[in-house]
Image (cartoon, rainbow, N blue to C red):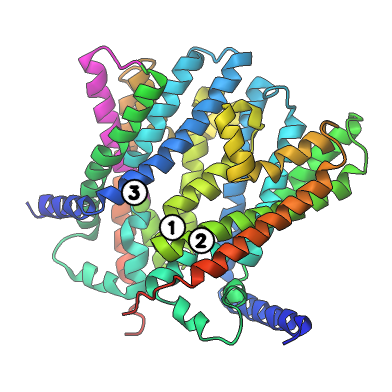
Amino acid sequence: MLYFTLASKAYARNLQYRGAHMVHNIASAMFGFMYACIWIGLGADHALGEYGTQGMVAYIAFTQSALWVTSFITNGLGIPQTVRTGHISLDLMRPVHLFPHLMAREWGQIAYQFIYKSIPIYLVYYFVFSIQLPGTLTSYLYVAIALIGAAYLSICMNYLIGASALWTTESSWLYWGNHAMINLLAGFFIPIEWLPSWLQTIAWLSPYPYLLYVPTRLYLGFGDASYLWGTLFWCVLLTLICLTATLLLRRKVEVQGG
Amino acid sequence: MTMRSWISLYALLIRTSIRSRMQYKFNFLLGTLLAALIQISEFLMVAIVLYKFGAIQGWSMHEIGYLFAVMTLSKTIYRMFADEVHHLEKYLVNGELDQLLTRPMPVLLALLPQKFRLMPGEILQGGFLLWWSLDGMMADGQISWVAVPYTLLIIGTGAVILFSIGLATATCGFWMTRITVLQNLTEDAARSAAQYPLTLYPKWMISLLLFAIPVGLVNYVPALYILRGELGGWILPLLAVAALFCLLLSVRFWQYGITKYQSTGS
């Protein structure tokens, strides 16, 4: 119940800014539009594999919308800020574990972003580019599971980025570094099978493809449900790493000034 | 004060900014390393498209590398000297601009050296890519050594244009306070768009990127002349004039905007 309250409060707080967020959606939609234009331009001269031009436009539309669920979440789950203000010591004193506490708050944020960012952005592309929707209910079910798993992976990654703030003041660089990896290895702009083989190997050894590529493939009807085992594996592994990181950071925490 | 004393004061403030940053060497190294990683992954995205499809709308791998490198280097010069213009929102939201207003110097001159950002990752990556593209095109006989001074010139004019766009966007903050979203459009999205040949985009978007948010003047238009011999030699002086015009316009806008500043106080 506590965790649900934390999530719903985070959702409600965001609701106050939905006007400003709608403006933000325009910027985000413009980015996707630009990427789609690049693929349309390329599609005029080249065959775009199994996707075709329309398929690549649908691919970009989905990844650009899914970014708000699996990538653009709170930088380091807000830990860097609490380290700077010293609030982290209070958070660690609470009778709840830091990881599920911050995670619950982030789920509220993600739910909000899904409804007020991902869906409106996707709707714009749906009408502008006349995108086809998946035909079967099972596709939607698989995509939903893949997206929830991807959001969870993203929470874990940001928790670890946030935890690094106890060791360095430059953790925001890790956040942006993580974004750069998402752009490249998660199949945000280019499907992973088009990467050079060495980069494909690196990508599949990391959790990144499960953030965007796997949900997108499932959505476009190219992938099968066995991908989801990979999502599950990374969810378990990253959970263990996050719990270990919490143990380490408890010993590292320093209260600076007052 | 004379121009010379302004410059020496500016240099002193920059040295102070660098020295304060060097107090945290590990952080500096980590930041530099990750910035380079981000730069490389950004270029890899473009490079992979080229690797897969060979050319984009008739532009070869070297030509696209050139577009990317010029944009990176121009942006690096702009952000090294004027990173705080890009981060003006922080000053507006926290009311920190008040402190700068009390200084006996123009606000912009006080703001710029607040944080001189060393960007070795970007310079190395952009420089290497530029060298690789120019070398490749010279080996093919597509361009001669004259392209080198021309390129240095357009990196400079490009930095001025990007600074002007950044300053004009930041100035909107005097009315809007929050400017990150606007910067997303005018700086990030526009710059990313110009990393590819503009002919990829619909006509209205090309006009937008040439006249409203003129990022196309940073790399695409000069590349048409320097790499492909299109347009004519007149384009380079015209670009310099255009850059100065953008600068003048944005500084005038800034001077007007600052009269509308209202402190948030606390």
Q: Which residues are magenta?
A: A132-157
Q: Nearer the viewer, mark 3 or mark 2?
A: 2
Q: Secondary structure at mark 2?
A: helix
- Where residue A227 appears, as percent x and y from the top left, is 35, 24
Tell me the residue that label 2 is attached to: B170
- Numbered badge on residue B233: none
The answer to whether residue B218 is above or below residue A256 is above
- Where residue B244 appears, as percent x and y from the top left, is 72, 57
- Where residue B192 appears, as percent x and y from the top left, is 58, 41
* Rendered image quadrant of residue B224: top right
| Residue B230 falls left or right of residue A252 | right
Of all chains, the one bearing label 1 is: B
What is the three-letter code of the residue carrying label 2?
Answer: Ala
Nearer the N terminus, badge 2 or badge 1? Answer: 2
Tell me the residue that label 1 is attached to: B179
Q: Residues within 10 Å of mark 1 (few under 14, many from 20)?
A: many
Q: Are marks 2 and 1 in contact (CB under 8 Å)?
A: yes
Q: Does any portion of residue B21 appear in the rendered image?
A: no
Of all chains, the one bearing label 2 is: B
Q: Tell me how far mark 2 sits from mark 1, CA to CA.
A: 7 Å
Q: Are marks 1 and 3 in contact (CB under 8 Å)?
A: no
Judging depth in this view, the residue of A158 and B130 nearest the camera is B130
Q: What residue is at 44 percent from the left and 72 percent from the top?
A: B261
Tell me whether marks 1 and 3 sit on the same chain.
Answer: no
| Residue A95 falls left or right of residue A166 | left
Q: What residue is at 62 percent from the left and 42 percent from the top?
A: B211
- On the rendered image, what quadrant is the C terminus of chain A found in? bottom left
Tell me the residue that label 3 is attached to: A73
Q: What residue is at 93 percent from the left and 43 percent from the top?
A: B145
Q: Tell me how far mark 1 sits from mark 3, CA to CA.
A: 19 Å
Q: What residue is at 61 percent from the left and 26 percent from the top?
A: B200
Judging depth in this view, the residue of A152 and A29 nearest the camera is A29
